[in-house]
Image (cartoon, helix red, strand yellow):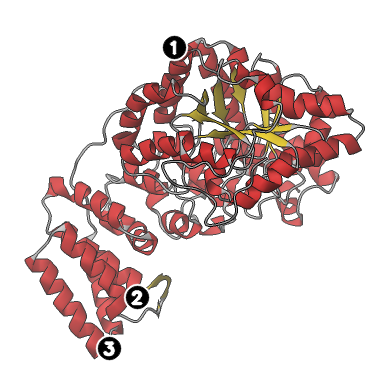
Amino acid sequence: MAKYFDPHIHMVSRTTDDYQNMAAAGITGVIEPAFWQGQARTSVGSFIDYFDTLLGWERFRASMFGIHHFCTIGLNPKEANDLSVANEVLEVLPRYLVKDGVVAVGEIGYDDITPEEDRFLAAQLELARQFNLPVLVHTPHRDKIGGTKRTLAVIREVGIAEHLVIIDHLNELTLPLVLDSDCWRGHSIYPNTKMSEQRMVALLQQYGTEKMVVNSAADWGISDPLKVPKTGQAMLAAGFSEAQVEQVLFHNPVDFFAQSGQLDKTLISTPLPIDQRRQWQDNSALRGQEPVIK
Amino acid sequence: MNMDVTAPPTAALGMRRDCLARQHQALAEQLDDSELHWWRQAREQLARQPDANTAALLSGQCKRHLHDRALPDNDSWSLIQLARALLLAQVLEQSSGSGQLSMLRQLFLWGDDQEKIAILKAFDWLDSHGVCVELALQAGRTSNSQVFAALALDTPYPSRHYPERAFHQLVLKALGMGLDISRLVGLSQRHGTALNQLALDLLEEQLAADRAVSVGLPLAIAFDQLSPVQHQRLIELNRQRRLPARWRDHLN
């Protein structure tokens, strides 16, 4: 069976069914970027607890279903605008960037494209440079072209190596802007918005597979955690080889985040052994079910 | 890159007292005897204890003591929204000038989404000076389209006080949420080449994705300010029948 890696998915919002279906579809690992929770947080403590969840309980929960779980840590652009919280979040980021399982700074970038977002994007790019970590950059929903151009400008202003940056949520209009850089190219496949499997295939046919990355960006909204393997099926149907599918949907994202030194490609090429007898802080995801061991 | 991020100033709100007095009158005329009894008690209690806790409690209790209904001659406000807005106005009036903004921020933070809606709808009555723009911008980051609509539609507040860039974002977000931007007060006064470019970028994005073009998108465009290249592009798209019918009126 083909192996897949979903480099952008918000698993805290998903069910154990999703983990089971993802594992069954060949997804061996995921990266969970820190992002916003659907409504604004009002204190730094909420961020700290969330970051701890990504590093702790969620990583454990993924392991119960044989999936390697990594995360990126950062202050999302929407909440960068609330200075009463954002400055404190920025202060705690360094101690998280050195934790096991953290493979990048992210997701950071622009939402409203404000001066505050400028400031926190630049500061976090600088942190990534300081900690020698890759960066996952979100591009905005509104004024996407302007936001992508400005993202590239700030990357160059800060001076972080472009090969350590992936610019995400690209589409037909913004991908060509990123192709002129050395940044990696992320695409989020959604049921109705962002990018579809067929449109993704068309981009791969037009621009090739180099540094091209695909994710589901599945979260608490209408989204599909199986969009990476579904894109694989669409690529095969369009005539791409199995090797090309695996290049785009496994090797590319893994190679990008492996630049962190925190992600062993050999290790994540196979699913984690499952032992559901294990517990996390005396807690289990089993809810009384018989533990699976395999 | 602009790194100049400063804390918002604290200043007195410029409340439109004549307008608020008219709204008080309009509300009182709609209340039945038991509602009026509670309403008077609530206002008296707030007069005695003009603090955020009391205002928040009374705002929450509106739903339990008043029957919600549309207001005659004012279909964009419900009775409970108006009652909440007027309680808020009362506690702000009783606050010191420099404390008004922090009181408003506190009550906004504590409010549930229905209370936030009432607050946002009242911004133009409460803040004629535009002191609350930063709070409005924060409020506009919501994903709740009803809350966003309260801020964006049927109120002149954004067009009166928002910086250009923020107003453009408001327009784009309203379109993204599928709101009727014909209700975005003052939109035509904010037309210009920058908004034209943003609207045309959105059009191209929607066409590239084979998505429906936002119904209200032409309303964001000053067609007489399009560059020759932009105009020609629209003519070409129209010739290819890729634009909805309502665009044709603007291109002839």
The quadrant the C terminus of chain A occupies is: top right
* Mark 3 and mark 2 residues within 8 Å of each other at the beta carbon: no
For residue A195, what is the image quadrant? Answer: top right
- Residue A85 x, y percent position in the rendering: 32, 36
Element under disc 2: helix
Whether labels 3 and 2 belong to a single chain: the reply is yes
Mark 1 belongs to chain? A
Q: Amino acid at mark 3?
A: Asp
Dividing the picture into quadrants, the one containing residue A139 is top right
The residue labelled by disc 3 is B32
Decide if residue B107 is on the left or right side of residue A96: left
Front-lying residue, A104 or A27 = A27
Mark 3–mark 1 CB contact (< 8 Å) = no
Q: Nearer the viewer, residue A72 or B112?
A: A72
Q: Residue B235 bears which disc, if any?
A: none
In depth, the one of B23 and B70 nearer the eye is B70
**Mark 2 lies on residue:** B79
Residue at mark 1: A130
Kindly identify the amino acid type of the residue bearing the numbered disc 1: Gln
Amino acid at dot 2:
Leu
Residue located farthest toward the right when viewing the structure as drawn = A239
Chain-order first, disc 3 or disc 2: 3
Q: Chain of mark 3?
A: B
